[in-house]
Amino acid sequence: MKKGVFCFLFILLNVSLVYAIGISPADYKTAFMPNEEQSFFFNVKVDYPKDAELYVSGDFANYTILDTYYLKRGGSFTATINFPDKAIKPGKNFLHIGAKETFAGGQGMSARSAVEALIFIEAPYPGKYIEAEFTVNDVNIGEPVDLLVKIKNLGTQDLNKVKVDIDIYSDKNLITTLHTEPRELKKREEAKFETILNTENLKPGSYKTIAIINYDNEIKTIEKEFRIGTLFVEIINYTKKVFENSINKFDVQVESKWNNQINNIFVEVKIFDNSTVIADFRTPSFELNPWERKILTGYLDTKDMSLGIYNMNLTLFYEDKTTIKSDKIEVIKKSSSFKELFTSTVILIIIIILIVISDLIWILRTKKKK
């Protein structure tokens, strides 16, 4: 016993804690430059008494040299890339610059952790090649829509003429086309093509836009959708059946058609027997974000309601406006069939388990006698 305790203490005293190691900055971004040299500065921090071993891996690792591969107690170093005349692959390349902690002095046992920084290298595609990003914003009725297309020339050739046209559709009907001024785009250059859509004559709803990018007679298209909002909150769904003689959870699902936040929104529910209100409640107030769909919850007490079908009105209040929905609600009897089925199933499973256990015990006993 004493020997075991001694061994445990010996191991505990000789196992080093896992010390932290960090490298900064976490990343760089650069472009591939044929036959050129680029240097990147890094700093490594390690907890005493650790040192750091440095390494390189990933794309362009064979073309990268560190000014040191070992840092005592951490420190700074430089990674230098000597780019070849041609990139190994076009597009995004990832060069990993790593630091691995090592125990100074080599005593004891320690877990070695490592950390890496990334150098993102964008290499050109052969010929004419672009990447484009299309953004369009939702608005409220009467507000202008900003349309922006960002284009980056990632090819090996300059582009003499780049032009963007944007088609606007309502359902499948083309309602207008917007144009931008053409311009040239040099290698590795990025440009913005912007225009504005006037929505004064457009109705609320969803619209489709197609950006048609023409670059030296080559075509690229990007599709997006935007919405024109109106101050309206729609009642999407709600509870239609409740149990008798109980307090029932009552959900009302609503959806905003407005491009701004709506505050203090709530639902008032009234149940009628002919023209007499026999039950009513309202939900707590909520906020509704632009275009958000949310469930508002209240509770309906059916203690004074008999089994049957009743008329129901739901009134949604928001921003001095209301949305009204009329429907039927049914009060039903609580069913115990599920509970009975569940109980019967559990009993049956227990009986089967007991039979199986009994059979296993009989088999084991029989084998022992043999």
Image: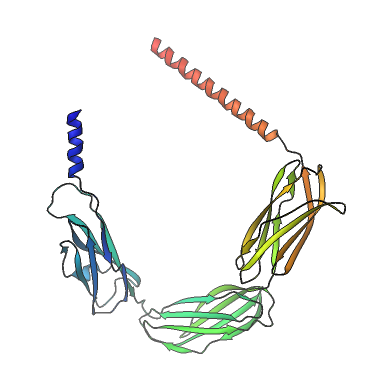
Q: Is residue 64 visible?
A: no
Image location of residue 210, percent across then percent down = 57, 77
Is 104 placed above or below 6 here?
below
* Protein image colouring: rainbow
Q: Quadrant of the N terminus?
A: top left
Is 7 placed above or below 33 here?
above
Q: Quadrant of the C terminus?
A: top left
Q: Nearer the viewer, residue 253 or 198?
A: 253
72 to the left or right of 301: left
Q: Residue at x 18, y 47 (%)?
A: 109
Is 24 placed above or below 170 here?
above
Q: Residue at x 54, y 79 (%)?
A: 211
Image location of residue 168, percent across then percent down = 61, 79
Is 125 placed above or below 349 here?
below
In the image, farthest residue toward the right? 274
Image location of residue 357, percent across then percent down = 49, 21
In the image, farthest residue toward the left? 105
Q: Residue at x 57, y 27 (%)?
A: 349
Image location of residue 76, percent across then percent down = 20, 69
85 to the left or right of 201: left
Q: For residue 38, what is the image quadrant?
A: bottom left
Q: Is residue 65 visible?
A: yes
Q: Nearer the viewer, residue 245 or 110?
A: 245
Q: How many marks?
A: 0
Q: For residue 37, what is the image quadrant?
A: bottom left
Q: For residue 39, what is the image quadrant?
A: bottom left
Q: Residue at x 27, y 76 (%)?
A: 86
In the image, farthest residue toward the top? 369
